[in-house]
Amino acid sequence: MLPIPDDILAHFNAVLAQKSVPSRLHDDYRKWLRYYLDFRVKYPPPDARSEQVRLFIQKMRSKGKSGKSLHHAAHALSLFFSLPTSNKQAVKHAEKVRAELSAPNEAATADGVEQPAQSAAAAEAVQKAAPSATRAPNQRGGRKYNEWWSLEKTISPEWDGAIDALAGEIKARHYSRKTLKAYADWSRKFQIYLKHKMPEALSAADVKSYLTYLAVTCKVSASTQNQAFNALLFLFRHILKKDFGDHKDVPRAKRSSYIPVVLTRQEVDAVLRHLAQPYDLVVKLLYGCGLRLFECLKLRVQNFNFDDGVLTVIEGKGKKARTVPIPQSIMQELLAQLERVKAAHDEDLKAGYAGVLLDDSLDRKYPSAAKDFIWQWFFPQRNLTLLPERQELRRFHLSDKDVQEPPYRAVRKAKLTKRVTSHTFRHSFATHLLQANYDIRTIQTLLGHADVRTTMIYTHCVPGRTVKEAKSPLDF
């Protein structure tokens, strides 16, 4: 096995000292880096770092390495990837070694590592999309993009304090991460528009000026303008403790009427024919139970009562819970998915992983719950996620980005003429029940709507009956 190049080794030793890695582990961390660099030489990996780590750690597990050793290996690679030019150095090193060893019988080896299988159930990934901004930013248009830029420090300590207070208030109210991101983003945009004017000097006139700018100059949609309005209202009322004003004279974008896109049963079946497991099962739950996408992805094993045929949605919109019947036609598919979850869970326990991700309160109250089978995600991610603050490997559920792409491709293959999103299947669920003469209140309960007026929108999707088709109650 070839030694680590001097330039890479120097930077890696520096980051080991910077991150306060115990000196007794330095040799082990350097060993894992050597194995990884040799692995790249023999098997050129994909560009995604998470996939590189997945393939490498998977093979190390197959070689009988312990869970603790694999944890050290994942941490060593995460430190290596934190170097600004780590990937370029690794690629350059691999190309150089391949050129030198291109002669027959001189192929480099990576401690006997073979090409790893792509279909393993358990694997590790180093990075995680989280507000702590611990992962490497995404690349968009050749520039680094950080979706949580609004939570980072700026040139104004006063605004930074206001944003921190806003984040704390939103978390205390148990609002969603999407709400936190949206409100923090609008607050930062408001700060930039006012050229970092001190928060204590803000007034209702500043809000009016900004909302007018959005409507007249930026020509934003009604929903975007309303979101900005709500974000600034929250900032003024709960953080700055200032008068927000009524702003009735502010130009407002006119809200367009909305009629949901609905698929026929034949169109739903056409989409399902082009989907593979587990994405077909996700879509069947969206359509068969009327779930929102995030409700489906956050399902855990304990949410399914197969004996009674009932699915309990715990983390619904607004933290409201409800129950829906499990479609009998997909019962066997759900049980097969449960068996796959069991097998992956057993493998994870043998590898010594730290369990699934739980809310902080649950994690503290029930320390062993993360490893209990009933708390496992019903649609788990293939890769494990490294939590840098805890130095633990945890499993997360499928992300919405993972699930949205396969149905999009399936719709294109089915040659449908409608614009279909994951929410379209929920619209179809409600409309088809309405067409089957289900009571509107029953549909409201199944969908989890707080107001029946929200459910009434589906009446626009059902063809009305003419007077000639009306019947007397005596004929019912």
Image (cartoon, rainbow, N blue to C red):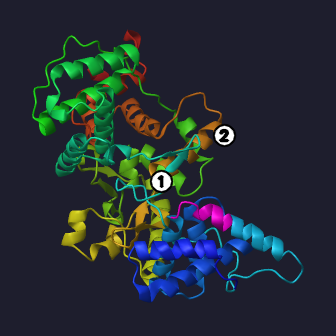
- Tag 1 residue: 329
Please provide percent x and percent y for residue 418. Answer: 55, 28
Chief SS of the magenta region: helix
Q: At 22% across and 22% down in the image, what residue appears? A: 206
Left or right position of 117 against 446: right
* Residue nearest the observer in this picture, 3 or 380: 3
Q: Is residue 90 magenta?
A: yes
Q: Residue at x 45, y 53 (%)?
A: 399
Residue extent of the magenta highlight: 83-91
Percent coordinates x, y for residue 316 in the rendering = 28, 48
Mark 1 vs 2, N-terminal side = 1
In the picture, the disc for residue 80 is none
**Quarter of the image that includes the N terminus:** bottom right
User: Regarding mark 1 in the picture, which secondary structure is present there?
Assistant: helix
Three-letter code, disc 1: Ser
x and y percent of residue 284 in the render? 48, 49
Instruction: Locate the C terminus by quadrant.
Output: top left
Q: How many marks?
A: 2
- Which amino acid type corresponds to the residue marked 2 in the rendered image? Lys
